């Protein structure tokens, strides 16, 4: 943690075991557990009988607002789940000004390190609010119980630093960076160092050893903390890979496992930049993230449509300038992407 951006401390983070059992001893009562219907049966035994619980069904902001009156008398909030439960817990903690304790149950997405909650307003994602958890708790037994491919997919929100920084390089070289976010070589270097560390540690990540989990978590932590500390600057942490994911989601109307779709975007983005595509595709595949469209419930035709629409999409959305703005998809590009994703090229 060397960059001055981290003079604002990242969220406190604890790794341990049997951590949920301690919650009644430190969370101000009565505390609200925010989790998902499919997770609650597994975890309810850790809490006293009658513990208030909110099972997330929607992230529509109007619905979250409607739930607020039911939170009267609640003294603290415990987030327990993946991205949605973590974000919903943030939202309630923000709107009721309550202490927040976060327990991510998997590593697919870096939501636990952002202050803002990803909510939807008439289906459009917006990041709103302000919640700093007292601590982010990673219970190693809970993580181990999540499907391995969901945890491994977390590498998407770390390897995206490669394509994010390359987009920033691309914009700088063309004089197209934003005045509010001038190119910062130190920020870019710190992001790349974390992505390189994760790449070098791919075996640990594949095996989800404590060292591998720490590589992912340290990447997430850097991403969230430096986004805020650099003045809400996303340039060094994301770019074309997330934009392709957003375009895919917008065009198909489907929800993807975050890291899985981001990994597909990383390979496509690396190809657009002409940088390290074989290496990244090979690493993602060896780690065990299935980034094939069929694994996400879509087809290659959907990917082709999203790629074709990408330059218009990033302009319509007002996304930061990068390679996506200038990219023209060809049949040859799509065929190469497919072979890389399916492991038929070097590095696979
Ligand atoms: Zn992400």
Image (tube, grey):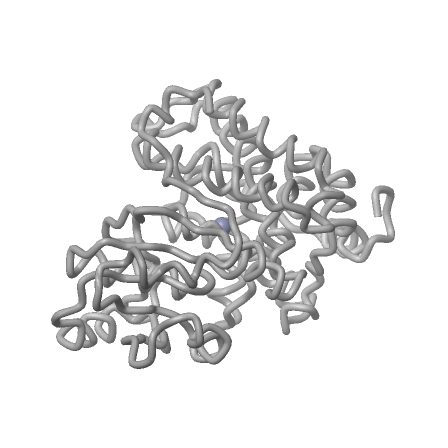
Residue drawn 69% across the image and 36% down it: 199
Q: Quadrant of residue 293?
A: bottom right
The residue under the point 27% across, 69% down is 32
Left or right: residue 198 compared with residue 281 = left
Q: Measured along the vertical axis of the image, is residue 69 above or below residue 221? A: below
Closer to us: 131 or 248 = 131
Q: Position of residue 68 (x, y in %)?
A: 17, 71
Give the residue drawn at x 60%, y 39%: 215
In this view of the protein, which residue sits in the foreground, 223 or 325?
223
x and y, in percent, of residue 343 in the image: 83, 53
* Image side of residue 77 versus residue 22, left or right: left
Q: Residue at x 27, y 62 (%)?
A: 77
Q: How many marks on residues? A: 0
Above or below: residue 170 compared with residue 48 = above
Q: Residue furthest front?
A: 25
**Residue 153 horizontal/vertical position (percent):** 62, 55
């Amino acid at each position: 943690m060397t960059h001055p951006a981290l003079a604002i401390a990242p969220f406190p983070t604890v790794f341990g075991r049997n951590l949920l059992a301690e919650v009644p001893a430190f969370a101000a009562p009565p505390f609200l557990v925010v989790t998902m219907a499919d997770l609650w049966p597994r975890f309810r035994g850790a809490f006293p009988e009658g513990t208030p619980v909110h099972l997330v069904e929607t992230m529509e902001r109007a619905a979250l607002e409607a739930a607020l009156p039911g939170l009267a008398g609640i003294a603290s909030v415990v987030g327990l789940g993946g991205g949605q439960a973590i974000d919903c817990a943030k939202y309630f903690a923000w709107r009721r000004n309550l202490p927040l304790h976060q327990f991510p149950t998997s590593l697919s997405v870096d939501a636990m390190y952002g202050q803002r909650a990803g909510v939807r307003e008439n289906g459009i994602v917006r990041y709103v609010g302000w919640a700093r958890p007292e601590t982010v708790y990673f219970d190693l037994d809970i993580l181990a119980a999540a499907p391995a491919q969901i945890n491994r997919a977390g590498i998407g929100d770390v390897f995206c630093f490669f394509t994010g920084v390359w987009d920033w390089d691309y914009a700088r070289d063309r004089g197209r960076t934003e005045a509010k976010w001038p190119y910062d070589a130190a920020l870019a270097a710190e992001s790349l160092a974390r992505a390189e560390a994760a790449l070098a540690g791919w075996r640990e990540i594949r095996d989800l050893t404590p060292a591998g989990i720490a590589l992912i978590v340290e990447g997430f932590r850097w991403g969230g903390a430096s986004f805020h500390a650099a003045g809400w600057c996303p340039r060094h942490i994301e770019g074309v890979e997330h934009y392709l994911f957003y375009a895919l989601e917008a065009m198909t109307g489907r929800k993807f496992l975050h890291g899985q779709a981001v990994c597909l975007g990383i390979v496509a983005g690396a190809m657009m930049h002409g940088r390290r595509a074989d290496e990244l595709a090979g690493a993602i595949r060896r780690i065990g993230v299935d980034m094939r469209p069929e694994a996400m419930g879509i087809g290659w035709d959907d990917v082709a449509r999203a790629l074709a629409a990408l330059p218009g999409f990033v302009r319509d959305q007002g996304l930061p300038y990068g390679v996506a703005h200038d990219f023209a998809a060809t049949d040859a590009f799509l065929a190469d992407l497919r072979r890389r994703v399916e492991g038929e090229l070097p590095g696979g």
